[in-house]
Image (cartoon, rainbow, N blue to C red):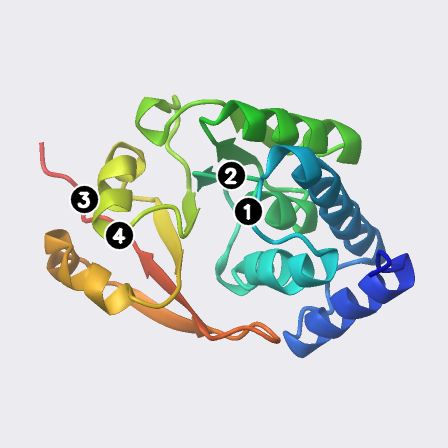
Amino acid sequence: MPPPSAALLTQILDAGLADMQQEGITPEQRSLLLDYVLLLQRWNATHNLTAVRDPRDMIPRHILDSLAVLPFLDQGSVVDIGSGAGLPGIPLAICRPAQDFTLVEPAAKRVAFLRSVVAELGLANVQIAPMTSEHYQPEILPDWIISRATAPLARLDKMTNHLQGPQSVVLALKGPGVEEELADWPRASSLDIHRHDLHIPGLPTRKLLIWTSPVRVP
């Protein structure tokens, strides 16, 4: 099968964004999103960064899936935990150039890819933290902590507990099995967790869980 044309990829992206009512994303940002997809496709051929090979599939499964978080993301600094190939951090950073994003990722080949993306796309608002989340110790706690299927909820909470200040909001993108994860997470009962269905064109409904930690008493 011949590679898809730029016009076809643009059509797929534009149709998906329109379906999700994300028309506020500028033409320049859309171009950067497609540049990111092509970089991911090129690196994926030798570095196996994602199981999704076809850029036509990368758009809904990676780009639109990541951008579904945008309506829930307000101003402030963002940390993407277990960013992998930059998801959801890179698409979000492209569409929110005034916000600071830190991508936390320990795997060397993924870090190399992320650094290449930041340099080639000129993403001045993105920093890379080449380490595990447990070793990431920022001087100022983030406003937003985002995770896209990095780990089960109990494990994710443990991985990021030191980052969850009273002003921090956690956004966890989850697929099937979220109810079992909640049942296996003892601290869930003490949190006010908001659940939202995310509708991405061509994909099963995703779940977004949002919570803040109670203020810690010394």
- Residue 109 circle label: none
Q: Are the residues flagged by discs 2 and 3 in contact, CB closer than 8 Å?
A: no
Circle nearer the N terminus (4, 2): 2
Q: Amino acid at mark 1?
A: Leu
Question: Which residue bears the numbered disc 2?
Answer: 84
> Could you give the CA–CA distance between mark 1 and mark 4, rounded to whole angstroms?
18 Å
- In whole angstroms, how far apart are the C-alphas of marks 4 and 2? 18 Å
Please tell me which residue lies in front, 149 or 20: 149
Q: Nearer the viewer, residue 104 or 181?
A: 181
Question: Which residue is under mark 3?
Answer: 215
Q: Secondary structure at mark 1?
A: loop
Name the kind of residue labelled 3 in the image.
Val
Task: Identify which residue is drawn at 39% across, 46% down.
Answer: 150
Label 4 crowd bin: few (<14), some (14–19), many (20+), radius 10 Å: many
Which residue is label 4 attached to?
153
SS of the residue under disc 2: loop
Tell me the crowding category of disc 1: few under 14, some 14 to 19, or many 20 or more residues within 10 angstroms, Cα based: many
Marks 1 and 2 in Cβ contact (< 8 Å): yes
Q: Earlier in the sequence, mark 1 or mark 4?
A: 1
- Count the labels in the image: 4
The label shown at residue 87 is: 1
Q: Secondary structure at mark 4?
A: helix
Quarter of the C terminus within the rendering: top left
